[in-house]
Amino acid sequence: MESDGSFTLISPGYRPTAGRLAFTISAQLVAEMDDDDLAESWRAAVELTAREAAELSDAAALNLMELLEEGLPTADLPVAVADAAVVFLIAMKRHGISDPKRIPACAVMWNLHAERARVHVAS
């Protein structure tokens, strides 16, 4: 975890040649979603109401922060990756991305005090 009660998820964006979306969790872990997992997760995110998405994203972010505080080598890595994917994909949806295969290179920053992800798209 970063020292100020935040974490950052960084992605080079969707890579069609690889058929994968990769992202780094606080520079500690690289996770990848293949096309099938990405499509399934995206459908689930799109079906959520705005309130459900906010609640799910906040819960996943808080859980991920706890896992990062404990240290990823001892944490349940599948849970950390799943929580990060929830935060990342819901942030992309909120940012106006309508197709997961159009996710650009970006950083999603979550701060405990703001309790909401901010998206910074690379130029």
Image (cartoon, rainbow, N blue to C red):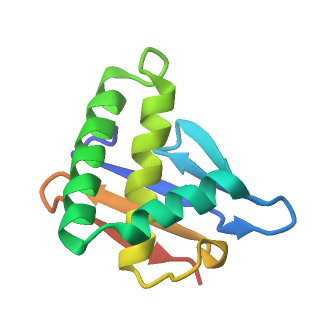
Decide if residue 9 is on the left or right side of residue 35: left
Decide if residue 19 is on the left or right side of residue 122: right
**Observer-nearest residue: 34 or 80?**
34
Q: Is residue 83 above or below residue 50?
A: above
**Observer-nearest residue: 18 or 118?**
18
Q: How many marks?
A: 0
Confirm whether residue 116 shows in the render.
Answer: no
> Which percent across, then down, holds residue 18?
84, 59
Q: Which image quarter: residue 16?
A: bottom right
Residue projecting furthest to the right: 17
> Which percent across, then down, holds residue 74?
44, 14
Q: Point out the image quarter for the C terminus.
A: bottom right
Residue at 51 percent across and 56 percent down: it is: 41
Residue projecting furthest to the left: 113
Q: Which image quarter: residue 87?
A: bottom left
Residue projecting furthest to the top: 74
**Observer-nearest residue: 14 or 56?**
56
Residue at 50 percent across and 27 percent down: it is: 77
Q: Point out the image quarter for the N terminus.
A: top left
Q: Is residue 35 above or below residue 93?
A: above
> Which percent across, then down, holds residue 37?
63, 51
Residue at 61 percent across and 76 percent down: it is: 104
Q: Which image quarter: residue 29?
A: top right
> Which percent across, then down, holds residue 96?
43, 85
Residue at 52 percent across and 36 percent down: it is: 28
Decide if residue 68 is on the left or right side of residue 12: left
Confirm whether residue 57 shows in the render.
Answer: yes
**Observer-nearest residue: 89 or 108?**
89
Q: Is residue 8 above or below residue 71?
A: below
